[in-house]
Amino acid sequence: MKTLLDQTYKFVTQLQAMNSELRDQVDVSIIIVNWNVKEIVTKMIQSLFKYTRNIRFEVILIDNKSSDGSVEHLQQIFRSEINEKRLVIIANDFNAGFAKANNQGLTVAKGEYIFFMNPDMEIKENVVLKLQDYFKSKINAGIVTCRLIYADKTIQPSVKKLPDLCSQILILLKLHHFLNWLPCIKNYLMKDFNYLSEREVEQAMGACIFTRKSIMDKIGGWDESYWLWWEDVELCQNILAKGYKIYFTPLAEVTHYEGKSFAQTFGLKKQKRFNQGMLRYFKKHHKAYEYWILYALQPISWALTLLVQFLKIKARPQSRV
């Protein structure tokens, strides 16, 4: 009798261990970096749990020391998902930046695939399954991205060529809005890109990047020397350098309430961070003279940023009181 009880106990223990292991298996880890957008990221996570079906997934949210109560709010709203380990929240005690926070998510991710998403997005279909299926259909895929649309349903430009000197000079001098017909800027921004057809591209927006965890491990994750901006350009550059391809597919669609976190960074501070990323990228991947040309244009870029900011303030309606 004792032997039978021991065997039964052993069998039940093994069964529980197997069930626990099955629960821990994940196909896709969705990684989100949040900063002070608790309402919109709540809506996003709700849409992920509502529409994602027939696939094992987890959501990993890294909060970069939000001051709007994001962590406490999400812990209350998604209590059951957290208890079931379908949602993992990492609360930083400082703002680690976009790249470092994404790498924090990677270290705990259990999925074979990784889906990096901005917090200001919403899905209305089974995007995760569609992107995984598409990725699997491409033998040499390194990144797959999909169509992004604004809240008003218009398509958001979300793919580019890798940057060259001409296009970045125009952007630094804020001439790309007026001279967007020039070949170098038109080519860089892929103005003629058809967002209704699938195609191989050079650069995908960091807001929506689907990849394989083993590929991220191979390239060493996100480059943390970029605090904000240009880290997605570096990521695409590194993945292409390993021989992988980047694909755009219109088979899946995500609504992007663009820049809700980034909009909290203003004027000259935002421009300086953008410029720092640009210089770092050109120093790593371009000829020295190209880097020094862009470096020399920094004061002009800052002055133009201050001028634009001043004109925007002057253009605001004046109070009648």
Image (cartoon, rainbow, N blue to C red):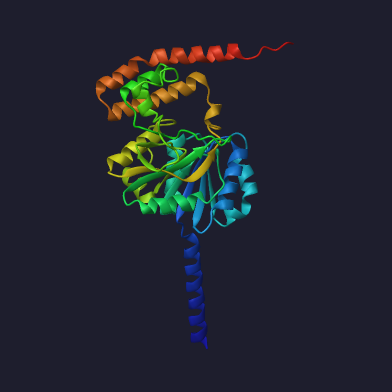
Horizontal and vertical percent position of residue 36: 58, 34
**Measuring 51% from the left and 14% from the top, which residue is drawn there?**
308
Residue 72 figure quarter: top right
Extreme residue toward the right, this view: 321
Q: In this view of the protein, which residue sits in the foreground, 55 or 61?
A: 55
- Count of numbered circles on the image: 0
Q: Where 199 sits versus 316, above or below? A: below
Residue drawn at 38 percent across, 54 percent down = 136
Residue 88 picture location, percent across and down = 53, 49
Residue 92 shows up from this direction: no
- Of residues 178 and 144, the one nearer the viewer is 178
Residue drawn at the location 54% of the way across and 12% of the way down: 310
- Residue 188: % across, % down: 36, 28
Q: Nearer the viewer, residue 132 or 97?
A: 132
Give the residue furthest to the bottom.
1
Residue 39 left/right relative to 203: right
| Residue in the picture at 32% in, 36% down | 237
Foreground pick, 21 / 28:
28
x%, y% of residue 84? 57, 57
Residue 236 vertical position relative to residue 59 in the rendered view, above or below: above
Query: Would residue 161 be seen by someone viewing this image from the given angle?
Result: yes
The answer to which quarter of the image holds residue 152 is top right
Q: Quadrant of the C terminus?
A: top right
Q: Is residue 177 left or right of residue 82?
A: left
- Indicate whether 71 appears above or below 171: below
